[in-house]
Image (spheres, grey):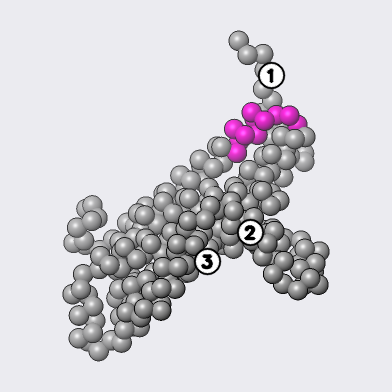
């Protein structure tokens, strides 16, 4: 039998309890900001991908291939260690010295650009699955291409894309753990920090795993609610 004395109370003792809760808060804010940015960029790039303009299609395809095929960890390192060096030296030093949350903001950008490439492919597939009758009906009422996409095509495609978007949302949330490598104290980073002082790796890692599980289940429930509320009667892909 393993001789190990469990001490679950260590998680809530000062200063580790507030630190762990702050890690959860940081994860939620970071993931939410990255997802909002990725969602907006993904829609824009997906429209480029199905555009009749060759330059836009080329830009969209290049964007997706670059950000989707480079490992996220490499992108996180690039944004933190390489991107600031592209600026003049005084500005680079100013960024590192004066922006205390620089790793947090750069982590958001890295996660957002990586996720947006995947989101754009989700939207591209759903845009291509929108019946051509929707376009013809919109054009017959006098809508411009811009208004057709805004009021007809994108809302329709959004409903079709909710299930795969749920998967991408979950991936975005879980991938936020990689930002610990540049010093962001989210859940995983906070867990490693607490363990280094308490040597209670089992307890704090279990607490972190439970936190990820609970938040993930909440995201699934939220997206299921959104899917139910946006359901269109008669759409074959949705269960009654």
Q: CA distance from mark 2 to mark 3?
A: 19 Å
Q: Is residue 101 visible?
A: yes
Q: Earlier in the sequence, mark 3 or mark 1?
A: 1
Nearer to us: label 2 or label 3:
2
143 lies left or right of 94: left
Ranked by sequence position, the earlier of labels 2 and 3 is 3
Name the residue at the top extreme: 1
Which structural element holds mark 3? Answer: helix
| Residue drawn at point x = 81 percent, y = 64 percent | 97
Residue labelled with disc 1: 5
Pointer 1 local density, CA inside 10 Å: few below 14, some 14–19, many at least 20: few
User: Within 10 Å of the Cα at label 3, are there few (<14), some (14-19), or many (20+) other Cα atoms?
Assistant: some
Up the image or down, 47 lies above or below 16; here it is: below
Magenta run includes residue 140:
no
Which badge, 1 or 2, comes first in the chain's sequence?
1
Residue closer to the observer: 130 or 6:
130
Please determine whether, in this image, residue 236 is positioned above or below residue 5: below
Residues marked 2 and 3 touching at CB (< 8 Å): no
**Viewer-proximal residue, 101 or 151?**
101
Residue 211 at what x, y percent from top left?
Answer: 56, 41
Q: Quadrant of residue 118?
A: bottom left
| Callout count | 3
Residue 198 left/right relative to 142:
right
User: To which residue does mark 2 refer?
Assistant: 78
What residue is drawn where x is 75% and y is 35%?
Answer: 196
Quarter of image, res 106: bottom right
The residues colored magenta run 198-208
> In the figure, 156 relative to 10: above or below?
below
Which numbered disc covers residue 37? 3
């Amino acid at each position: 039998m393993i001789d190990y004395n469990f001490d679950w109370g260590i998680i809530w003792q000062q200063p580790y309890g507030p630190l762990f809760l702050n890690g959860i808060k940081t994860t939620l804010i970071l993931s939410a900001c990255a997802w909002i940015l990725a969602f907006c960029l993904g829609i824009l790039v997906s429209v480029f991908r199905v555009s009749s303009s060759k330059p836009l299609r080329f830009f969209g395809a290049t964007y997706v291939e670059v950000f989707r095929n480079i490992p996220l960890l490499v992108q996180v390192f690039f944004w933190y260690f390489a991107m600031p060096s592209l600026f003049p030296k005084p500005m680079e030093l100013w960024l590192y010295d004066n922006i205390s949350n620089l790793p947090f903001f750069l982590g958001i950008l890295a996660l957002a650009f990586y996720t947006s490439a995947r989101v754009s492919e989700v939207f591209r597939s759903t845009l291509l699955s929108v019946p051509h009758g929707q376009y013809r009906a919109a054009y017959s009422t006098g809508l411009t291409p811009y208004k057709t996409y805004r009021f007809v095509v994108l809302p329709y495609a959004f409903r079709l894309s909710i299930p795969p978007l749920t998967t991408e949302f979950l991936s975005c949330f879980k991938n936020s753990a990689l930002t610990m490598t540049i010093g962001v104290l989210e859940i995983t980073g906070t867990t490693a920090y607490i363990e280094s002082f308490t040597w209670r790796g089992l307890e704090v890692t279990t607490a972190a795993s439970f936190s990820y599980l609970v938040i993930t289940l909440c995201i699934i429930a939220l997206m299921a609610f959104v899917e139910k509320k946006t359901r269109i009667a008669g759409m074959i892909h949705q269960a009654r």
